[in-house]
Amino acid sequence: MDKIETLTSENAIVVFSKSTCCLCYAVTILFKELGVEPLIHELDHDPEGWEIEKALVNQGCNSPPVPAVFIGGKLVGSTNEVMSLHLRGALIPLIRPYQSLA
């Protein structure tokens, strides 16, 4: 879907989310604590949200399809993949180019 491609190519880190999803919130907080400000795109606030969600499933985001995390334009996955990367020490190198210098 064009909207996914546009958002992920124009923003370093994108989290496709739903405002009522606690796992989406946890991933967002993790990124903020690691010094990055991801673009949070709330599917339940977007008129095209259902189509975006279907497109995310087609790209490999499984049940549930949110949060869907993209870093540097590439699909990383959902909460399990992000947390696994973090526990293995592999998340920081992925986000380092996008961390704030503060």
Image: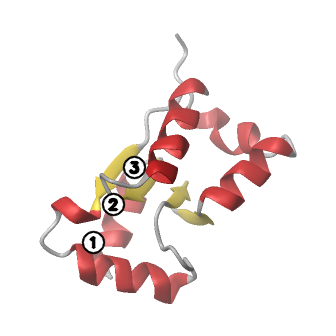
Q: Which residue is mark 2?
A: 7
The answer to whether 66 appears left or right of 99 in the picture is left
Q: Which residue is mark 3?
A: 11
**Disc 3 residue type (three-letter):** Asn
First in residue order: circle 3 vs circle 1: 1
Q: Residue at x 52, y 22 (%)?
A: 100
Q: Secondary structure at mark 1?
A: helix
The answer to whether the residues at label 2 and label 1 have Cβ atoms under 8 Å apart is yes
Q: Residue at x 58, y 82 (%)?
A: 60
In which quadrant of the rendered view does residue 76 lie?
A: bottom right
The answer to whether 68 appears left or right of 89 in the picture is left
The one nearer the camera, 45 or 2, is: 45
The answer to whether 45 appears left or right of 79 in the picture is left
Q: Please identify the residue farthest to the bottom as the structure is shown.
A: 58
**Disc 1 residue type (three-letter):** Lys
The answer to whether the residues at label 2 and label 3 have Cβ atoms under 8 Å apart is yes
**Disc 2 residue type (three-letter):** Leu
Q: Which residue is mark 1?
A: 3
Q: Residue at x 69, y 60 (%)?
A: 80
Distance in Å between CA atoms under marks 2 and 3: 6 Å
The picture places residue 65, in percent across and down from the top left corner, at 48, 73
